[in-house]
Image (tube, rainbow, N blue to C red):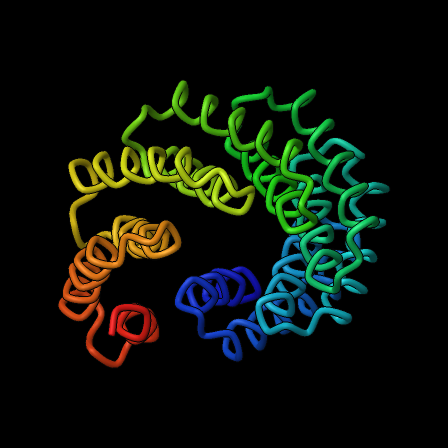
Amino acid sequence: RAGYLHSLGSVHLSNQELGKAQECFNTAWHARKLALGSEHRQTLSSMYSLATVYTHQNKLSAAKDMLETCLKLQRHALGEDDPHTLATMNGLATAMERKKEDAAAEAMWADCLARKQAVMGRASPSVVTTMGNLAVLYNRQARFGEAEALYKELVRLQTERNGAQHPDTLLGLHHLALLYRNQGRSGRALGVLEACLHTAEASLGPDHPLTMDTLHELGLLHSMLGDSARAAEVLERCWRRRRRALGAGAAQTRETEECWV
């Protein structure tokens, strides 16, 4: 029954049914703790998943406390470099970053990244995830040089592993373009966004969320550059696509409409 509840919790989490996911993971965790012990791998898996739900619910103090306890137990039972231990390190750093504990989050992510690279190799998807998390933190802190280096490496690794047309590769390019925009390098940002959009439309389709997000950002960038006519044309195109794909009342559709009108 605990295994079924854990699996059901994962389905609820993927569907953003957070209340149901919390109930399932909590019940599975307590059941596994009674049956298997607090340090069993399956018990720790349910504990980690419950903490992840707390993060999604923005219950950040509860998430951080549970992840810290989970990490301590995993290090003792599974080892410092077990993939599940490293996943908890990444999740704990995420909770810290969202609580604006930037120094602690950076230290945790840096340690996690180094361990993942040693255990999994630089091209592992898990490595790329942590690399992206660090890049987002550096970008928010206006540490643009460090963020740019990570985004470029991320795009290179994704291109080698998945190809230039893969959504993860294009998402990395999208973030790199926004970094250039934040730096005031608008011309560079424009070139990367246009290339990203061209590839996304061809490989993912015009109504893919990443394609529409890139189109929206391209319109905003044209507006920043003073090209009002081009901005209006691009934003109207994005609005029509979002209205068709998401509906007129969707938050993204309304956001584009407010920027366009």
The quadrant holding residue 62 is bottom right
Q: In the displayed structure, would residue 234 be above or below residue 251? A: above
Q: In the displayed structure, would residue 248 be above or below residue 182? A: below
User: In the shown orientation, is residue 26 left or right of residue 182?
Assistant: right
Count of picture labels: 0
Residue 103 placement (x, y as % from top left) = 83, 49
User: Which is more toward the observer, 87 or 77?
Assistant: 87
User: Which is more toward the observer, 124 or 84?
Assistant: 124
Residue 79 placement (x, y as % from top left) = 80, 35
Quadrant containing the C terminus in the rendered view? bottom left
The quadrant holding residue 2 is bottom right
User: In the shown orientation, is residue 47 left or right of residue 180?
Assistant: right
Residue at left offset 32%, top offset 69%: 259
Residue at left offset 19%, top offset 36%: 203
Residue 5 placement (x, y as % from top left) = 52, 67
Residue 68 placement (x, y as % from top left) = 81, 56
Residue situated furthest front in the rendering: 226
Residue at left offset 18%, top offset 42%: 201
Residue at left offset 16%, top offset 59%: 237
Q: In the displayed structure, would residue 72 be above or below residue 160? A: below
